[in-house]
Image: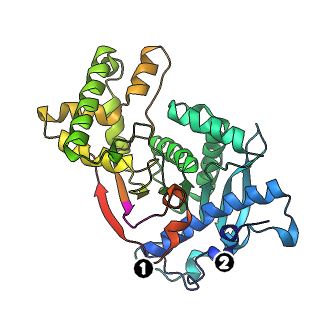
């Protein structure tokens, strides 16, 4: 039996009957709903819900999108992504500063249900090891995005993802920057591959731990001569800094809240030793350094030079609520906004 959270008429943003594409809440709600559509597509597959019994389509049809392609994982045949096309032409939409997307490529996160659980958890582990870029989901997602960009250009395409799906969307977005395309990207509860230092309550202890990690990271990078092997690494980070994805983080979610500490601490470290330690630590993780030292090329793809971070500071009953996609279309959120740019 389906839960209420799967049914759009019971848990979706029903008040968005008139869409203002210049409204940040509307854009965030639509992007999150389209990601939810991927989750429900996979749940429909798992539960063999077809035709009138399927629950997924309202999550995109309500906003005048149509499903044009489903991304299928070849290892377990699960649905992990969707490509949506807006039915309305740009000429028929009312907008001011920002235009609606023509296409949205959305990726779901982990589903702990039989049918996709094993592969999803395997990919979660790959992410923690900085190896998600070797997965078939990433390569299929990147190829799909490249195909759409070649057809429609990059200005009218959004990327969106939640949890593991946001890690895939982030990887795709990073690689598209290298090809010269800065795609508008919405990352909900993006995982951060690090110890959750942000959960330390004592501010002095937390700050001291972050400094220690930064110094160790910079020291390890120097020891394995990452900088001499990659003299252009800082230039690549600067090129990437022109791309500013939207990150949506819940302060109570240990999976993504470390992004808050990452950006805040990076700004503080830029004032120490001329910012050299901060720059090295901002671009590397201890795990990626160790992997590279062992001869396995590894990039800490979760580390971002720039981002527009929206933080949900409201109370949460439990982890499920703090990490859930549903929170991001609620109209009563207590949000904090901050732009972080690498300089």
* Residue holding disc 2: 10
**Residues in magenta?**
310-316
Q: Is residue 145 left or right of residue 284?
A: right
Hey, which quadrant is residue 65 in on the image? bottom right
Q: CA distance from mark 1 to mark 2?
A: 32 Å
Q: For the point 38% across and 31% down, which residue is it?
A: 285
Q: Earlier in the sequence, mark 1 or mark 2?
A: 2
In magenta segment, residue 314 = yes
Q: For the point 29% across and 48% down, which residue is it?
A: 201
Q: Nearer the viewer, mark 1 or mark 2?
A: 2
Which mark, residue 274? none
Expressed as whole percent of the image width and height from the top left, the position of residue 223 reads 29, 14
Expressed as whole percent of the image width and height from the top left, the position of residue 257 reads 39, 50
Query: From this viewpoint, is residue 239 visible?
Result: yes
On the rendered image, what quadrant is the N terminus found in? bottom right
Query: From this viewpoint, is residue 63 visible?
Result: no
* Residue holding disc 1: 96
Q: Secondary structure at mark 1?
A: loop
Hey, which quadrant is residue 160 in on the image? bottom right
Q: Is residue 211 left or right of residue 320?
A: left
Q: Nearer the viewer, residue 205 or 195?
A: 205
On the rendered image, what quadrant is the C terminus found in? top left
Q: Secondary structure at mark 2?
A: helix
In magenta segment, residue 341 = no
Q: For the point 73% across and 61% down, which residue is it?
A: 68
Q: Is residue 164 left or right of residue 246?
A: right
Q: Nearer the viewer, residue 291 or 314?
A: 314
Expressed as whole percent of the image width and height from the top left, the position of residue 72 reads 74, 47
């Amino acid at each position: 039996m389906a839960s209420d959270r799967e049914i759009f008429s019971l848990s979706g943003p029903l008040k968005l009957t008139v869409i203002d594409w210049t409204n940040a809440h509307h854009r965030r709600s639509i992007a999150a709903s389209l990601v939810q559509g991927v989750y429900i597509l996979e749940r429909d597959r798992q539960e063999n819900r077809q035709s009138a019994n399927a629950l997924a389509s309202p999550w995109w049809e309500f906003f005048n999108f149509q499903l044009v392609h489903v991304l299928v994982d070849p290892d377990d045949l699960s649905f992990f992504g969707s490509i949506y096309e807006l039915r309305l032409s740009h000429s028929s939409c009312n907008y001011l500063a920002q235009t609606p997307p023509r296409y949205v490529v959305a990726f779901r996160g982990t589903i702990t249900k039989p049918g996709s659980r094993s592969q999803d958890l395997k990919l979660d582990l790959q992410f923690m090891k900085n190896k998600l870029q070797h997965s078939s989901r990433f390569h299929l997602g990147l190829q799909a995005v490249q195909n759409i960009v070649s057809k429609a250009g990059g200005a009218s395409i959004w990327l969106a993802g939640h949890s593991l799906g946001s890690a895939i969307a982030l990887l795709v977005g990073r690689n598209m920057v290298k090809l010269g395309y800065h795609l508008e990207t919405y990352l909900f509860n993006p995982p951060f591959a690090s110890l959750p230092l942000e959960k330390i309550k004592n501010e002095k202890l937390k700050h001291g731990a972050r400094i220690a990690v930064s110094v160790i990271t910079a020291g390890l990078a120097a020891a394995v001569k990452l900088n001499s092997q990659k003299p252009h690494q800082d230039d690549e980070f600067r090129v990437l800094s022109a791309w500013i994805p939207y990150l949506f983080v819940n302060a109570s979610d240990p999976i993504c809240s470390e992004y808050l500490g990452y950006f805040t601490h990076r700004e503080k470290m830029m004032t120490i030793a001329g910012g050299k330690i901060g720059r090295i630590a901002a671009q590397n993780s201890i795990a990626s350094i160790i992997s590279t030292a062992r001869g396995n090329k590894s990039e800490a793809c979760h580390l971002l030079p720039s981002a527009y971070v929206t933080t949900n500071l409201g109370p949460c009953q439990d982890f499920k609520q703090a990490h859930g996609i549903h929170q991001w279309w609620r109209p009563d959120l207590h949000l904090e906004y901050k732009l972080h740019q690498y300089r």
